[in-house]
Every structure is written in structure tokens, then in C-alpha cells.
């Protein structure tokens, strides 16, 4: 990180030259690919020598906000960290709160949570794949296809939770409601349809010759580098590291379900895209098992208002990788301190490291960035 | 006093050609149609509706509405830009494709400027101006994105234009003439795409590079360079850029149809040969742009190094091989007859 800072100049000077034909290209915050952040790219026109990720444009102080809210009021600010992946993000917070309150959710609630989280993972991966394709210039064709494919899942989530986005469905001690009548049948029909759609996406896009030309062998992270740089989620597994919090430290109903872990040995941008497609298949499998093996019983238990003094850590596998939520309590109904360590922050570090180890061209930069599925709001908190 | 009315009356056919068909009105009409068609066609593939509000039902007035909006917008010229070049280039750029269209025959003896037997050479001569003016627009704006886009445009045009020219050399040898009119007449029985299939493949890939659409929209690559050399242009100047882009597509597509797909030849539906020729050339044009749009939507963008490697390592040897094959076919197997 230290030598990276040498190049940091005046961030407001757009036409600054560095000599030797080198200049700094500011991709963002107003750029088709930048999102809510900025990539400062040191380039000589085509070759990229350095990418600096400038985060913090959307910092909302989520951790500080949580100190002034009761445990259940904290749900809303936490959810807003990643709108596309709210259930998985919220699970991290809810899991930590349940640990510090010392309650255990009923088994049925765990299964419902698993279903909602996996549907959310499918939605998030579809969005990531759409953005990756758009970064390699698919007009917005694949992006709109994947966006359309999300719709049945959004409808199902609306049926279950009452909202398409940011459901606030998980509460300490369970979930807000049981599954409605007719949900299971509709879900199974949707899953059958979606499995065929994955094949279509794979055929039209993952096997596309030009897409492979753009992504194969580009942005390679070796197994060792992935561990050293702290890459997270599907990006880590695409480098051949078999680490998935759902397997290694099971939460919700994952410990009782049988599913495989998707790994790839290549570690390039193609492997990262491929891993997301395969993870959607695994998610479909998990949802099927969970809906079939769901136990009966209550979906919510009463929880105490105040926590005992102490601390709790909860790991959760969000769509972008492992997120850690650490809560310290001083015995009140509000947390004393909350620390959230999101996955996107660590993935941004890998984006910064890759141009130092291999040749990256300017045209590769958007593909490289979006192969990690970055989310500025996640990293900014 | 100059007798303007008498001058126009004396030269009425050439005025009709320049102003109506295949001149100004045709080019504007094609651009308006092509933009609308591209929006609707791509929208259907993307599972969208495309424009629906302007115009009764199909949104056919959308581009007119967009043009009105752009014309009423403020012209923003960057402070660091070379103002004269920045403005002049926007008016020069659409002229070049229009001049290229002038040599294309639309019916027997119906071209704006037949160029007395050298129309194909004139077409390529004019087309070389496009990247020259193109780099000026990137340089004049004095912006990093535009200058990178302009340089990419030069790389791509050199890597694409040479194979395209050599591939059409195959047609020239096969037909034994530089005259597009004669080339079309020789295709009355058989389109040149069949004897020149290798040359056509080379021509088509290079052609995609010349019109700068996906997979070769490298100069304007949106996800990297915002809008490449056009990034700083706004309002009416942007409209001119868009016009030049689509007129460029029109010119090169017309050349492809003329060289390989029989030009204006087709079954006689209309008694008038000019109407008949125009009808068939427009039908072929629509099929060609549909194919171009389908390619745009189904492929990713190549990287600049991959595109240049394709041009120099594959297209160039193949186009030379095509010339060799054409010579062998024509002079040793068919005894020099086309």
C-alpha cells in the first residue's frame, strides 16, 4: 500500500502530466463504469501501471449510527450497505445481535432465512454478471437479460416479505413472518425455470469466444496471492482456495444441508465470472433442499431488550465474500461499538495489487474491476 | 445577373441527385431511420420496448425529438480546447462519408459522380481522410479520454483499412476494372461474394473495424473512454458527430453491397430502372444493417491489441492469399474472363 501513495497528486487537477508520456486518468465519480467511487489510473495511454481505488464517496457512518440505535432499529442502516444483497448483509448483523443477546432462532426460521439469503445471492450474482458483461461492451444486452431474470425472484420475495428490496425480514430471534400459502409451489416452478435460464446465460455469454478472449488469463491471482491479499468470496474460490463460510463455519441452516463448494484453479477474470454462474446453480440446489426439509414450528422467539456486557463476532458469507460483524455491548439496549468488516473492501485491495504483478491494459481495467463484483457502498459503510 | 433558375433547370438531374437521392435527403433519412431501427431492434433483443412516446405508436419521431433537444442545447466548448479546430471538425466530418456515397451507383448510370472509371479508387482515397479529421477532433478537445480515443482510432483504421483495400483488390482483379458501375454490371448473373468468399470474409471483418461498431468500437469504448473522441462534444456538435458516424456506416455498407452483393441488381419489380435499382439497394441495405446490429448485440468488444493483431496477423495475409487465388482462378482456370 505504501508505494501506491507516491503517485497521489492533487485529486482536483484533471489535466496533470507526469512526464515520460504518463498521465493519470480519473475514472469516476462521473464515468460509465465508476459507480459511487473513483478509480485513479496511472497510464501511458494503453498500459495501466497503477490503479488506485478512491473509496469514501458514499460513506454514511453506518457503524456510528448503530451506536445510537437499539438492536432492532439497527436493521435499517445495516441493510442499506448493499441494496442488492440485503438479506446476506443483514444476516451478519442479526447473527451478531443474537449471539450477544444470547438467543437461538427456531429451526424453521433458520430454514426460511436460508431460502431468502440464497435467493438474494442469485439476484446479486445476476447483477454482477450483467455488470461484468457490460464492462466488456455488451451494450446493455446481457445486463438487461440478467435484470429480467431477477424479476421472478423479486416477486417471490415480495410475496414472502412484502418488499422487493430491503425487506427488513430478519429480526433478532427469527423472521417476521412464516411462508405464505402457495409460496412453495411457486418457488419450485421458478427454480425449474431458472435452471434453464442459467444454461442460456452460460451458452450466450460464458462460452462466447470474444468474452473468453477478453477475460481468460487476465487479472490472474494465484492461490498464494489470494490468501495474502485477503480476497473474499467467489473471487477467492476462483483462485482455488476452498473457503466458504457457509461450509467452514455454518450458520442458519447451512450446516444441515448438503451442497458443494464451487472452486476454480485459474484465478483469472473468466474464472471469477464462471464461479458466479456455478454458485447460482448451487444456490438453486440449496433452496430446493431447504424448502423440502423445512421443519415445522414457530418462526420467531421473544428476545430480551438488553444485552449482557460482552462481545460477539459473527461471520457471514455475503455474495461478495465473507463479512465479519463484531459487536461490543456495555449492558444497554444499544451496542457500545459495532465494527463491520465488509468483503468489497478487501476485494478493492486486490484490484489495486493486480497491476503491480502483471500487464493490464486500459481496456482490461473495467473488466478487471467488475470481475471482482465491487460495491462501493459496501466498502464505504 | 446570374440566371439561377436557368442554371438549376439546365442541371436538374444533378441537383436531384445531390439534394434528394442519393444525396442529402437520403442520407438524413437513412440516419433517422437507422437510429430508430437500431433502438427498436436492439431493444427487442434486450427484452425492452425501445422508444414508444414520440410518434404515434412505434416512437418513430424519437430521433427528431432528440435532434430538437440537442439543437436547443448550449454549445459547451472546453476552456483548454482549440476552439476553431474543435468547431470546424464537426462540420467537416459528415462531409467525408457523404462524398464517399457520391461515387456509389444506385441504378444503371445513376451516381452523383461516376468518376470516369476510377470510382472505387476514389472511394478509398476519400475514406483515408476520415481518420485524419477524426484525430483532429480528439486532439482539439484537449481531454485525456478524447486523445486516447483518437489514437486508438488511428491504430484501428490502419489495421483495418489495408486488409479492406487488399480484399477489394481481389474484386478489382476479378472484374478487371476500378469502375463500380461496371463491377455491378458484371454481377448480373453471379454475385462476387461467391468467387471472392475469402476476400469477402476479410472485407467484412475489416469493414466492422471501419464503421467502429462492436466488436470494434474500440475508439469510443464506453466503459473505458466514456465516448472516445466525441466525449467533449455537446448539443448540435454532438448531433453532427452522430450524423457522421451513421453516414460512415451507410457509405461502407453501400460499398460492401456494391462490391459483393450485386449492388442495384435484382428482379425487375418496378418498370423504371432507377426506382428498381434504388429499391433493391435499400432492401440489401436493410438486411446488412440488421446483420450489423445483431453482431453488435451478440459480441463483446475486442481489446485494441487483439484487434490490431487480428488486422496485421490474420486479415492481411488472408487478403494477400485472396489476391493470389483470384489471379490463379482468373488467369489460369478461366482464361482471363470474368
Image (cartoon, rainbow, N blue to C red):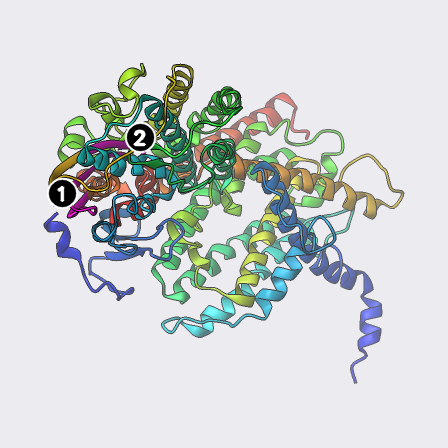
Is residue A288 placed above or below B298 in the rendered structure? above
Left or right of A230 in this view: A71: right
A149 sits to left or right of A99: right
Quarter-of-image position of residue A239: top left
Magenta part, dominant SS = strand
Residue with the most extreme right position:
B271
Q: Position of residue A4 (x, y in %)?
A: 14, 50
Q: Is residue A326 magenta?
A: yes
**Residue B221 visible in the picture:** no
- Please state the horizontal and vertical placement of residue A294, each as a whole percent of the image: 39, 18
* Whether marks 2 and 1 lie on the same chain: yes
Residue range corresponding to the magenta coloring:
A314-339
A102 inside magenta stretch = no
Q: Nearer the viewer, residue B289 or A329?
A: A329
Q: Nearer the viewer, mark 2 or mark 1?
A: 2
Q: Looking at the rendered structure, which numbered label has been put on residue A328?
A: 1
Amino acid at each position: 500500500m505504501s508505494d501506491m501513495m507516491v503517485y497521489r497528486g492533487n485529486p482536483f487537477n484533471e489535466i496533470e502530466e507526469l512526464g515520460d508520456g504518463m498521465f493519470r486518468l480519473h475514472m469516476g465519480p462521473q464515468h460509465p463504469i465508476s459507480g459511487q467511487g473513483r478509480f485513479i489510473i496511472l497510464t501511458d495511454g494503453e498500459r495501466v501501471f497503477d490503479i488506485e481505488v478512491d473509496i469514501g464517496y458514499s460513506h454514511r457512518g453506518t457503524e456510528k449510527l448503530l451506536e445510537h440505535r437499539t438492536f432492532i432499529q439497527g436493521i435499517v442502516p445495516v441493510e442499506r450497505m448493499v441494496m442488492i444483497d440485503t438479506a446476506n448483509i443483514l444476516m451478519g448483523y442479526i447473527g451478531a445481535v443474537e449471539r450477544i443477546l444470547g438467543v437461538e432462532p427456531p429451526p424453521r426460521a433458520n430454514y426460511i432465512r436460508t431460502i431468502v439469503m440464497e435467493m438474494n445471492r442469485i439476484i446479486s450474482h445476476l447483477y454482477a454478471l450483467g455488470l461484468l458483461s457490460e464492462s466488456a461492451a455488451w451494450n446493455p444486452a446481457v445486463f438487461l437479460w440478467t435484470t429480467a431474470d431477477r424479476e421472478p425472484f423479486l416477486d417471490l420475495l415480495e410475496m414472502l416479505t412484502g418488499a422487493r428490496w430491503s425487506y427488513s425480514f430478519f429480526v433478532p430471534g427469527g423472521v417476521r413472518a412464516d411462508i405464505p400459502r402457495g409460496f412453495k409451489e411457486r418457488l419450485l416452478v421458478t427454480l425449474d425455470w431458472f435452471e434453464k435460464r442459467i444454461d442460456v446465460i452460460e451458452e450466450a455469454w460464458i462460452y462466447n469466444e470474444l468474452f473468453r478472449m477478453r477475460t481468460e488469463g487476465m487479472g490472474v491471482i494465484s492461490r498464494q496471492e489470494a490468501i495474502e491479499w485477503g480476497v473474499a468470496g467467489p473471487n477467492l474460490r476462483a483462485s482455488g482456495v476452498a473457503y466458504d463460510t457457509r461450509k467452514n463455519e455454518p450458520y442458519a441452516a447451512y450446516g444441515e444441508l448438503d451442497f458443494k463448494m464451487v472452486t476454480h484453479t485459474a484465478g483469472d477474470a473468466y474464472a471469477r465470472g464462471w464461479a458466479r454462474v456455478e454458485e447460482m446453480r448451487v444456490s438453486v440446489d440449496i433452496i430446493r433442499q431447504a424448502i423440502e426439509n423445512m421443519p415445522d414450528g414457530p418462526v420467531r422467539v421473544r428476545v430480551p431488550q438488553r444485552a449482557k456486557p460482552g462481545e460477539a463476532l459473527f461471520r457471514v458469507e455475503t455474495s461478495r465474500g465473507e463479512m465479519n460483524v463484531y459487536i461490543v455491548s456495555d449492558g444497554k439496549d444499544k451496542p457500545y461499538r459495532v465494527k463491520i468488516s465488509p468483503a468489497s473492501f478487501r476485494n478493492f485491495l486486490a484490484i489495486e495489487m493486480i497491476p503491480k504483478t502483471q500487464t493490464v491494459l486500459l481496456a482490461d481495467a473495467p473488466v478487471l474491476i467488475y470481475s471482482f463484483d465491487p460495491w462501493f457502498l459496501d466498502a464505504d459503510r | 445577373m446570374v440566371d439561377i433558375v436557368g442554371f438549376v433547370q439546365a442541371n436538374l438531374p444533378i441537383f436531384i441527385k445531390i439534394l434528394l437521392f442519393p444525396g442529402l435527403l437520403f442520407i438524413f433519412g437513412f440516419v433517422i431511420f437507422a437510429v430508430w431501427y437500431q433502438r427498436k431492434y436492439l431493444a427487442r433483443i434486450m427484452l425492452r420496448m425501445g422508444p414508444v412516446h414520440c410518434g404515434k405508436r412505434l416512437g418513430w419521431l424519437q430521433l427528431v425529438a432528440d435532434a430538437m433537444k440537442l439543437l436547443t442545447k448550449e454549445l459547451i466548448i472546453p476552456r483548454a480546447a482549440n476552439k476553431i479546430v474543435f468547431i470546424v471538425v464537426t462540420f467537416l466530418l459528415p462531409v467525408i462519408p457523404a462524398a464517399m456515397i457520391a461515387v456509389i451507383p444506385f441504378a444503371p448510370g445513376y451516381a452523383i459522380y461516376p468518376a470516369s472509371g476510377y470510382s472505387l479508387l476514389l472511394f478509398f482515397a476519400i475514406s483515408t481522410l476520415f481518420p485524419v479529421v477524426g484525430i483532429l477532433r480528439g486532439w482539439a478537445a484537449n481531454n485525456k479520454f478524447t486523445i486516447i480515443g483518437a489514437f486508438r482510432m488511428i491504430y484501428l483504421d490502419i489495421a483495418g483499412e489495408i486488409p479492406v483495400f487488399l480484399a477489394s483488390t481481389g474484386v478489382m482483379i476479378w472484374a478487371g476494372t476500378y469502375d463500380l458501375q461496371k463491377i455491378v454490371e458484371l454481377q448480373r448473373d453471379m454475385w462476387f461474394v461467391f468467387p471472392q468468399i475469402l476476400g469477402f470474409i476479410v472485407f467484412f471483418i475489416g469493414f466492422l473495424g471501419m464503421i467502429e461498431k462492436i466488436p470494434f468500437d474500440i475508439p469510443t469504448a464506453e466503459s473505458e473512454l466514456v465516448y472516445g473522441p466525441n466525449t467533449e462534444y455537446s448539443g448540435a456538435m454532438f448531433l453532427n458527430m452522430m450524423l457522421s458516424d451513421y453516414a460512415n456506416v451507410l457509405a461502407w455498407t453501400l460499398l460492401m453491397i456494391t462490391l459483393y452483393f450485386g449492388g442495384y441488381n435484382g428482379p425487375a419489380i418496378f418498370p423504371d430502372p432507377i426506382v428498381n435499382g434504388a429499391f433493391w439497394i435499400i432492401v440489401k441495405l436493410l438486411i446488412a444493417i440488421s446483420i450489423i446490429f445483431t453482431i453488435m448485440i451478440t459480441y463483446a468488444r475486442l481489446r485494441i491489441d487483439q484487434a490490431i493483431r487480428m488486422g496485421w496477423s490474420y486479415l492481411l495475409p488472408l487478403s494477400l492469399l485472396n489476391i493470389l487465388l483470384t489471379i490463379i482462378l482468373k488467369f489460369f482456370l478461366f482464361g482471363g474472363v470474368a
